[in-house]
Amino acid sequence: MTHTLRDLLDDGRVHVIDGAMGTVLYGRGMFVNVCYDELNIKEPDLIHSVHADYVQSGAEIIETNTFGANPVKLSSFGLEDETGRINAAAVSLARSAANGRALVVGAIGPLGIRIEPFGPTAREEATEFFAQQVKGLTKGGVDGFILETFADIDELQAAYQAVRGLSDLPIIAQMTIGENGNTSYGTSVETIAERLAELGADVVGLNCSVGPAVMLDAIERIARVTDRPLSAQPNAGIPRSVGDRQIYLASPEYMAQYARRMIDAGARFVGGCCGTTPQHIKLIRDHVASLQPRISSAYVSTASPDATAAAALPLAQRSQLGRKLSEGRFVTSVEILPGHGWQPDEMLTQARALEEAGVDAVNLLDSPRAHSRMGVIPAAVIIQREVGVETVIHYTCRDRNMLGMISDLLGAAAAGLRNILIVSGDPPTMGPYPDATAVFDIDSIGLTNVVDRLNHGLDPGGNSIGEPTRYVIGVAANHSAVDLDREIKRYAWKVDAGADFAVTQPVFDAAQLETFIEQTAEWRVPLFAGIWPLVSLRNAEFLANEVPGVFVPDPVIQRMREAQERGHDAAVAEGLQIALEIFEAIRGSVQGVHISAPSGNLEVVVDLLQAMKTINRRVLP
């Protein structure tokens, strides 16, 4: 692990914490009357396996199995004198399971007794109880601390002071609330946020007691009153009694969807609490990976001093597309879909039509909306061999682990493919195989780094691959993102990672694209504007409401509605006119267009290409 918890706090990214320990232990046969903290000594292999499963699922931060390992709670089992030993052993187990792939934070929960003014325990006495636990965790070598599931903010303050008296490592401070958004003491989430920030907590957050829906509301409220990084670890819903057991019913998919909403609300550290399992964390990790760069310690370079990066081939020498980009020429590309089956005839017919229409490149989509199709790499090889037009392969991070990606990319390079557009990929739940699993070893930013390294003759481990690959690297840019600041950060990271060009989402508002261009001027690479000629009102409404990241203004919807009332041909003509207006408005601000063929309708695309040529002849000297 080459980064610290402080690095994660400062990097502006979202990071994944693990889920429940007790839930998994109970599921593996441990009765509730057992001291779960003592299992660090009595059943170390069991605790190690739970930690390892969370790390394998993608957790970047794992908590020690010490939620109740304070001398007060341990005294119920006659183990108060073992406080230091149990906590140090817990850290050792977590570190071994993390194996350099995750950071380890010492988990500290409430004492289980009330402190003044609501109970007989003095605050100084409570601080000393917590200090005994902190000493064991510090001796074990934690990367930081997580104070969690506190209902009394004064008790959390005692725990905080115990940590600060012994360590200056970062502290994640989390309170627990009820369905009404307040603690059991009646403290509001706004007060929680303000008090924890005043205390000096490095991360302010919530965990346990409530499901993701209630916690989302609370996180939205907290985000309005503090600028501290936020954390959210909800339960997997509210438990229901099934027979003699309490069952948490929120599915991994449901938890992952809400994790994404909490990230949108401002959370930077997300995970789970009671009822969550490694499968919940895996899907949460997948959603996080689709939103922003994920730095995985598993792929940190281990290059020896002898491994030397070669100079990448100049852009103009990598492909025809690269040459045109380097010369500043205006470029047109069109998307087509490989077939559902294995016969390439229809795909080849479309490619020939586009080649005759004069496109610079044919873009091949990689299983869009999680529907399986012929692989883009063999499809591109067939098109270039049979038609002769240059291709750009879309390549998603969703379906492949790192090993598979590198194998694909080396094979594609050997087959003569030179242009790649890297995207994270739609989640499998969007497609016809909702039980299919996503991989997301790395996201599109991480893969851009990988391909750039291949272009310098190195694999991700710093080993030489011989002659460097010659990829022209494209990335996606969502100019109409709801959170434009986050999207601009992602865009900057992609350019920094080695992108040679970028492709926007379909543009239906030229002013919106101009705003994006102005705000990203510092990191500009050749930009292709997405163009989507609408063919019906239904097509426009589908894009507006069901395709993430696409913005279709109300006036465009209204124009398509009025045209649709005049019939199908009128709607197609209106969609073509809208596309031409957008093209004419943005033509001078971009270096190319990336045209989508709605429902595979190449006829309208060819008409659009011909009309665009007329406009180009007007504007070119």
Image: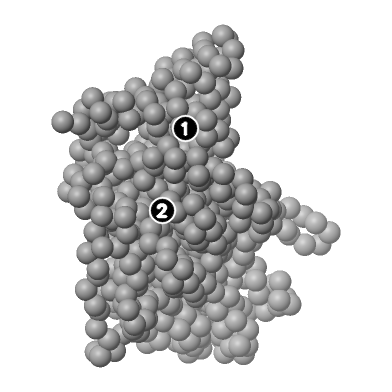
Q: Answer whether residue 89 is visible to the viewer in this image.
A: yes
Q: Residue at x 48, y 18 (%)?
A: 573
Residue 427 against residue 97 in the figure, above or below:
above
Going from the N terminus, do you reach mark 2 or mark 1 first?
Answer: 2
Q: Please tell me whether mark 2 sits on a helix, a strand or a loop.
A: loop
Query: Mark 1 = which residue?
Result: 605
Q: Residue at x 37, y 25 (%)?
A: 611
Q: Position of residue 545 (x, y in %)?
A: 53, 31
Under mark 2, the amino acid is Glu
Display colour scheme: one colour
Where is residue 475 drawn, in percent x and y? 36, 53
Viewer-proximal residue among 135 and 230 = 230
349 lies left or right of 63: right
What x and y, as percent, mark residue 183?
49, 49
Q: Badge 2: few (under 14), some or many (20 or more) residues near its Cα, within 10 Å?
A: many
Q: Position of residue 242 (x, y in %)?
A: 80, 56
Among the 4 quarters of the image, the one containing residue 315: bottom left
Q: Amino acid at mark 1?
A: Val
Query: Vertically, is 1 above or below 263?
Result: below
Q: Is residue 119 visible?
A: no
Give the left or right position of residue 251, taking residue 116 as reference: right
Q: Residue at x 35, y 54 (%)?
A: 474
Quarter where residue 125 is shown: bottom left
57, 493: nearer the viewer: 493
Compare residues 619 and 434 and report the one nearer the observer: 619
| Residue of label 2 | 390
Q: Which secondary structure, mark 1? A: helix
The quadrant the N terminus occupies is bottom left
Give the CA distance from mark 2 to mark 1. Answer: 18 Å
Residue depicted at x 20% and y 38%: 518
Quarter occupied by residue 36: bottom right
